[in-house]
Amino acid sequence: MPLTSEELATLTKDTPTNLPLLPGFITHSSLPDPPTRTPSPHPSEALTPNQTSPSANCAGPLREGNSSTWAARNPTRPVIRPQTPPPRLTDAQKASRKIKRDQKREATKSLHDGISEYLDEQRVKIEVLTRTHNVTPKHINDIISVHTNYHNSCKPQLINALIHAKAKELNAGSRYTLAELREMVTNDPQMNKLTKEEKASYIEALNEHRDKKALGVRANNSAAARDVVATTERLMKELDDLRVRTGIYATLFVVRGHINGTIQSTMHGTDNTEDFWEDIYKHPMADFLRQYEQWACTQNQMIVLFCMCWPHLTLFSVAVTGKKDIAMNYHNYETTIVETYGVRLVGWPHGVNFISPSNIGTVGDIRKLRDALKSRICYWTVLSPAEVKSHAAELNTCRLAGKIVRKPRKKCLDSGVPRKRKAPATAGQAGQENQRVSKKAKRTTPQLRQAPKSSEVVESSDGLEDE
């Protein structure tokens, strides 16, 4: 706050007046008068339809000043106030609560003592029953304590079970409102005189209906699509509300899980989440949605389709040729299969590459092949001798023309490198090599049992006797 002229005069009354002023020092009296300020009106009174709120201009400084919480970073939004703590208790209130606490403690202790006494008596009676009926105490305890004291908080009520039963009974031909069904249940004399078993059966039927509604599958693709749309809209609203309350960023992808599904793929991102995919991966969010749908539709389906196509393509050896263990060869099909065995595969689907089903990359192509094989549009046929000769002549013509008829085998990595050759074997060695080696000869020297070595020179017993 700047000093007034009187305060400056009081501070400088004892200083000499002929001292030069320091550069840049300007007295308060030489400053121009500040402009007059009028109090700003209330926002509801000052704003016009064509004006914007000044909070938008001050949001930046406020955000820079305090950014510790989401509420502080959004001062213009309404804040959900936390619950205020209760007021402090007075001494009289504390004393009163202490008395109540002591009384409750004494009552609880008395109850526990009574329960302990009852349990002791029960233990004695159980021991008597064990000796009388020749059973274990555990067996009697299991019979006594079969019921539990805990239950779900959302336990179905009997009135709801009765309304559900009445709705199933009456809503077959016409529709009734909930109020009408409730009134019918109240006025029905049969439902007012139910036994315990009948009440339990009604409640069990309601529980089964709720479980089926929560975990059951939709009957058709149309119903499944409507369920997905309703649930997705609810999820998107929840995520948007959660973003406003807490400031989180979330991305939601919903795609179909099967190629035959009619569910519309949906994506949703809170705030500016869609910019993340373009900034980081340089692709729009829709591209990832498409790839996610393709991945989901191909899960565990390519294997099933391949297993359905494989028997029709590989088991032709027994059904057509009458020979066993003939492997299908797609690379050299014209020579290895058609020319050798005189059979041909007719009706291969148009647009599908003639390769092994395990190498077909798209679900649509392998589905075409599966449908063609299943409907017998694609099948194996036996060629006549004239057709076999004509096919062989075509192959010879292609060979003479220089075309590749049979796909060559891959060369070894060390092809063209000279290798060490073994010396030619003599006639004796060749005869020995042709002879079958016995098992005893195959045993190496260390494997043979070594006999004890004899002495090189053995002294005679006569010489010993002469000495």
Image (cartoon, rainbow, N blue to C red):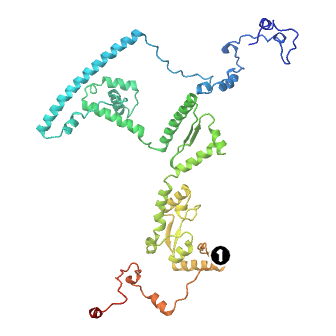
- The relative height of residue 379 versus residue 297 in the rendered view (above or below) is below
- The relative height of residue 329 versus residue 271 in the rendered view (above or below) is below
What residue appears at the point 20 percent right and 26 percent down from the top-left corner?
118
What residue appears at the point 52 percent right and 69 percent down from the top-left corner?
345
Q: Which residue is mark 1?
A: 403
Taking the image as shown, residue 441 lies to the left or right of residue 264, namely left
Which secondary structure, mark 1? loop
Where residue 133 sits in the image (x, y, percent)? 12, 39
Where residue 314 sits in the image (x, y, percent)? 47, 67
- Of 287 and 388, nearer the camera is 287
Asked where in the image residue 236 lies, by quadrant, the reply is top right
What residue appears at the point 65 percent right and 75 percent down from the top-left corner?
403
Asked where in the image residue 165 lies, by quadrant, the reply is top left
Query: In the image as oriented, which residue stretches furthest toward the left?
Result: 132
Quadrant where the C terminus lies? bottom left
Where residue 91 sits in the image (x, y, percent)? 41, 10
- Of 245 and 2, nearer the camera is 2
Taking the image as shown, residue 387 lies to the left or right of residue 19, namely left
Q: Is residue 149 visible to the viewer in this orientation of the structure?
A: yes
Q: Is residue 375 visible to the viewer in this orientation of the structure?
A: no
Where residue 69 sits in the image (x, y, percent)? 59, 27
Indicate the amino acid at tag 1.
Answer: Lys
Quadrant where the N terminus lies? top right
Using a 10 Å C-alpha cutoff, classify the residue at mark 1 as few (fewer than 14 neighbours), some (14 to 19) or many (20 or more): few
